Amino acid sequence: METTFDPTDALRTVAARCAGRGLCAECAGRLFGRFGHGLTNPERASRLGIAGAAGAGCPACGGAFDRLDVWAERCERAADGLEWHRFTCGSRWDPERLAAEETLWHEVGTEWGESVRSAFNRELGKRLEARSGAAGGADRADVVFLADLPVGRVDLTVLPVYLQGRYRKWDRTLPQTRWPCRRCHGRGCATCGGSGKTYPTSVEELVAAPFLRASGAEGTRFHGMGREDIDARMLGRGRPFVLELVRPRRRSLDVVALAADLGPDAAGRVDVVDVAPAQASDVVRVKEAAPEKSYRVGVSGAAAVAKVNEALGLATARPIAQRTPRRVAHRRSDRVRPRRIVAARLVEAADGRFTIDVRTEAGTYVKEWVEGDDGRTEPSLAALVGTPLKVEYLDVLEIHDPEA
């Protein structure tokens, strides 16, 4: 059905002022972009009786709209070898040309104009959709094309692929993420054997390896819902994480199959479950979450069972005050944080050793709560029992996030 567009006297007056300015049909029509829904800008110009000039000499766009196919080809070349199904377009213009556009709008008296940048981005997107079959202007784009008109090139941004899941860690020698060597800061030295790392590998590297290979990504970023100590196991349903694949060349991944076989290096050390596609917003959700956690703690110390049970009852009665532990003081601000032991129970005891299960508020340093950290945690379990205690091992039994 033909679009109805009946120009008013005001529109005709503005159109008359456009005569002789050498505007191309695209730029003449976009002076009236808020009228004639469904029309292209050249169609608007035609309905108003404005004869568009040759695009190359247009003072508003400099002929940019006549070169849309050239720019679309440059976009395709910039993304050569990449898999992409959704995209967005942007453009960078000479500030003097944008200022001249404002002057033009003032001189002709239009209040209905569409900016040259907005019109160019839209029309370039249409050309790219037609050539590539990809969806332009879509949410969660795979790539972003930026046409730099003054320079004559296209800058390409490849958006990450995000995956979410939960990992379980069985190895007490694995950090969660890659740990650069403190001496060389990742460059490689005699201390780290040239690897640039304090530890040979990490949960991040073991989990990311198959996805990195399959996607051809340049690298990864690992976002965990908190982290356990290197010597602590992560059990239960696992710790939620988001894996970010940086500048992937391939995006269609069989994530279930890849997660099921992390490879021999991960066997018996790390596994992952519930892997699924994710979005950038999931990184924020995971990083800002503060769920309670349950632990199993092996403790040594000459404490009677009755005294331990009494102390565990007292521990849940009121908050504890934890000053930043000495072992993390180099990377955390030194302050006192109130925390809460939600629940605690004795599991077993024998020969100067006992095992306890505790559920804590997010951010509680469990080892320091047991041992006291030279008085930096008050009251500690050691203080309540009245004898020195030492944590022999610690396991995270569950992360009590809403999805758990």
Image (cartoon, rainbow, N blue to C red):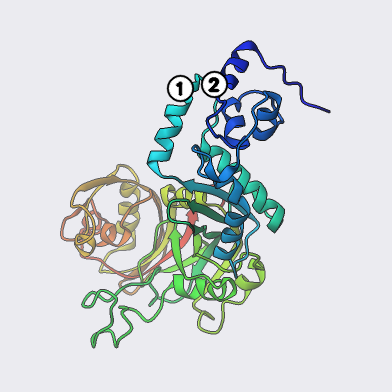
Q: Can residue 6 be seen in this view?
A: yes
Q: Which of 81 and 106 is in front in this view?
A: 106
Left or right: residue 37 versus residue 122 is: right
Left or right: residue 259 versus residue 285 is: right
Q: Which mark is residue 17?
A: 2
Name the outermost residue toward the top. Answer: 9
Residue under the point 30% across and 73% down = 180
Q: Which amino acid type corresponds to the residue marked 1 in the rendered image? A: Glu
Looking at the rendered structure, the secondary structure element under dot 2 is helix
Instruction: Report, in whole angstroms, how far the alpha carbon at label 1 lies from the one at label 2.
Output: 8 Å
Quarter of the image with the N terminus is top right
The tag earlier along the polypeptide, 1 or 2, is: 2
Looking at the rendered structure, the secondary structure element under dot 1 is helix
* Quarter holding residue 274: bottom right
Residue under the point 66% across and 47% down = 126
Tell me where residue 197 appears, x and y as whole percent. Answer: 32, 78
Category of crowding for the residue at label 1, using alpha-carbon neighbours closer than 10 angstroms: few (below 14), some (14–19), many (at least 20): few
Residue where numbered disc 1 is placed:
107
Tell me where residue 281 appears, x and y as whole percent. Answer: 50, 48
Q: Which amino acid type corresponds to the residue marked 2 in the rendered image? A: Arg
- Give the mark count: 2
Tell me where residue 323 appears, x and y as whole percent. Answer: 20, 52
